[in-house]
Amino acid sequence: MYLKLPFLIFSVFIFSAAVGQEQYKGQIIDKQTREPLFGAYVFIKDDQGETLSSGYTDFDGNFQVKKPPLKEFVVELSFIGYRTFQEKRSASSGNNLGVFELVSDGQELETFEISAEAMTGEVRGDTVAFNANAYKTRPEADADELVRKMPGVVIQNGVIQVQGEDVQEILVDGRPFFGDNPAAALKNLPAEVIEKVEFLDRRSDEGQLTGFDDGETIKTINIITKPDKRAGRFGKFYGGYGTGDNYLAGGNMNFFNEARRLSILGLSNNINQQNFGADELGNLNNEDSRRGGGDDLTVGNMPGITNTNALGANFSDEYLDAKMKITGSYLFNDRDNVLHRRSSREYILPNDSLQLYNEERNNQSRTQSHRLSMRIDYDINERHAIIVRPRMGYDRRTALNVRDAMNLFDANTPINRNENTTASHRESWNVSNSFTYRYKFAKQGRALSTSVYTSTYDSKSNSDLVAVNQNFHTSQADSLIQDRENLYNSLYYSINLNYFEPLSEKSRLRFNYRVSNNMSDTFQEVLVQEQETGIINLDSALSNQFENSYKTQRAGMGYSFRNEKFSLFSNFEMQSALIDSDRIFPGFENTKRNFVNFLPRIVMNYQVGEYSNIRLDYNTQTTAPTIRQLQDVISNANPLQISNGNPELDQEFSHRLFTRFRRINPETNRSFMFFLYGNVREGFIGNETFIASKDTLIQEVLLPQGGQYNRPVNLDNYWFFRAYSSYGFPLRFMKSNLNINGGLRVNNRPGIINSRNNFNTNTTFSQGFVLSSNINERVDFNLSTRGNYNMVRSSLQQELENNFYTQTTRLDVFWNFIGGMFLGSSVNHQLYSGLGEDFDQGILLCNMDVGFRIPPSKKTEIKLTVFDLLNQNVSIDRNVTDVFVEDVRTQVLRQFIMLTVTYNLRRFGGYNMAM
């Protein structure tokens, strides 16, 4: 029943009655020749520069665009070879905007000397736009190579940052492109089709429909394509084979026909390329899944070595005279992974005592993932509009994990050892849907909106554990044979109702009410085989059935004010929350707790002059414990490290403060940004750790001497602080751009170790720079370096100093030196200092390319690549928690040689896609 709910909402939307939507119309002509301009781009924007609607001119230069719900708006006209036109208009002037005359630039900008001095872009409120022709890239470059050259942009390990903030969405001509996977979107769009790149803070769905600035934004890149590149077929196909039977094959194909667009991606390899947005040959920095992953259209990178087969597609189109816009993306990913990892921990114990934990892990797994995401925008008429966003995901995973773990008093005195093998299987489904509706009253600014969000998640897993425990003190050994089955189901819904009342042309009130409920249940059954008799029995200490709900109700009032330079949003809410937990087995027990909180929020934006902007955002929120944190049942997947839930947990309350100053001058290509972020949590859900000094029985489960027992508890005095700044400017003497950055991070994390409070403070100073060329298409390079000096202090062991330094430097070079011949190199140097004798080292990873682009079209490329030329690739990492400091070494891809053939397809203009 729960799975049908999102699709029921979607069906209701499809059968809604539709009536005509008012539109603006007009014509664009050349001022000198009086000829109509075909393919000119038309934007309707608000006074902050955010795009509200867009369109194109036909063969007669005529256009039609959706009418926005504003009294005043800005018309922006753009056409290659012509000056960008902007004019402020009023809705009272009628639906016919008239005839617009565009003026030619009067120069072709054919040579790089002129282009390098051309106007790089413009600033409009929170939106910064850069002209693509002001930045030079190598032939057949992807969009990410163009975007990374722009001021304040850093792309590293699949994460795109603009002025220190992570980009969460990519738009192409105002429409989503590959959902929540920005790296894939930029990697599979050629740079040559791009006219402009906009960086903006995109409003929430509700903010877009109602025009009410509620402070909710996501960092977004909007790519504006060249008018003559909006119809056609383009893409690339590649295949390679190398030593060690390494291979790589894949490609992308784009079918563009104005509003109707289809993109198809394919990938198959055994060299660790796990996402479409990754580096072409392997994961250079060997990042693992701890970086994140699991958004709708990407997967978290697995550590180790992975064989991947993947297929993706993205579709967008407009219907009903552009009143309905549909976009959708799909991703299938099949990965076989082999992992070998060694780790060593040093525990932070009272009285300066020492305990070590060493682990060697070998894992083989296969994971299959399906992701489907859609977005439907439907302007039913002038008063009614909706946005529907259904999503679906399916995962299936099988794994065999072999672990050899040991606790030690010191490097030469072992306490005990555990060798275990676990075979596991898991399947999970998740389905969600967001439905947002807006109704506008006759009075300007008065509106009603509601949003409904539902999601379901179901998973089933089972695992077989065989373990042997050896006690070095007693010279005894015992074994454990265990079968575990786990079922987990959850249903979440939230309903939000808002009423908007205008106070003036520049200010509005919002009254809101929201109710939500997160209901979940889990069932865990553990069967254990007795050593003496071989009889299989239910282990009631490890088995559990648990149900939990977290219901909240929020009511409040918000105020929004906006003029040309200043905007303010303030919101004040009261929240009532109820945690209701039932332990069904073993033995019924009910836990209920009520919370009442006052949740204020204030967001301010101030435009300082033409190019500078200040933003201040203070926010409060609560976070409920998860069902696994509440579930009172022992987990002994690693018998030396057991864990348990805590049904007495309370919710967290967070205060967050973010302030940013930004100045970007696109005329001089200079940018400066500085931000501060702070987070203080009351009732922080941390860990209480008990390290056994002797064999200890915990809830009928034996914890051997030296073993660790963890459970979540509420703690105070958690805080986090971050400061970051960057300054970018051109180096005209070498036709390059330089970006210098620096930062400070301080994290104070509380914990409890053997009944003693511990505060672990981790301070990190960082500095770096990025130098990118802007010379011409024959020479292209990017040089970046970033160093981090870390200081770790513990209140339990104040004499313990864990200071260490890491630095990563990367150089990418491309040189087209004779005709179609080219050289390419990617050099990555990693420096580690202060990690200990076995880890302090410098690692130089070098990839070298030599290739030829076959004339006359130069669309076919043959390339020979040497991966890890110096055969030095290793993976080293340090993890710091409130309980331990851990060093990790992971198996990585080593040296190989590969021959790759790539074909680039470019066919634009006059293409009609029949579908």
Image (cartoon, rainbow, N blue to C red):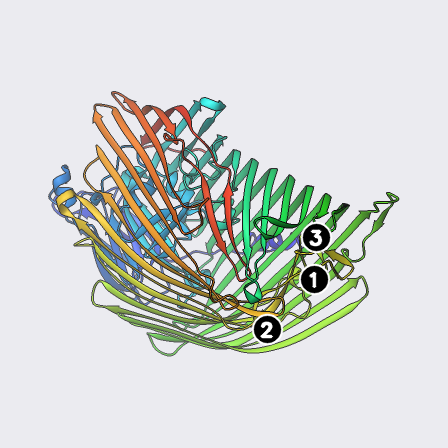
Name the residue tied to disc 2.
553
* Residue 27 visible in the displayed image: no
Tell me which corner region of the image, top left, top right, bottom left or bottom right, holds residue 593: bottom right
**In this orientation, which residue lies closer to the viewer: 742 or 360?**
360
Tell which circle, 2 or 3, labels the residue nearer the N-terminal end.
Answer: 2
Tell which circle, 1 or 3, labels the residue nearer the N-terminal end.
Answer: 1
Residue 123 percent coordinates (x, y)? 24, 58
**Along the horizontal axis of the image, is 109 left or right of 44?**
left
Check disc 3 and report its element: helix, strand or loop: strand
Which is more foreground, mark 1 or mark 2?
A: 1
Residue 826 drawn above or below residue 198? above
- Marks 1/3: CA distance? 14 Å
Number of on-image labels: 3
Which is more foreground, mark 2 or mark 3?
A: 3
Quadrant where the N terminus is found in the figure: bottom right
Residue 878 percent coordinates (x, y)? 47, 51
Residue 636's mark?
A: 3
**In this orientation, which residue lies closer to the viewer: 593 or 677?**
677
Name the residue tied to disc 1.
631
Residue 810 percent coordinates (x, y)? 32, 42
Check disc 2 and report its element: helix, strand or loop: strand
What residue sits 40% from the left and 27% below the top?
A: 238
What residue sits 76% from the left and 57% below the top?
A: 701
* Residue 317 visible in the displayed image: yes
What residue type is disc 1 on?
Gln
What residue type is disc 2 on?
Gln
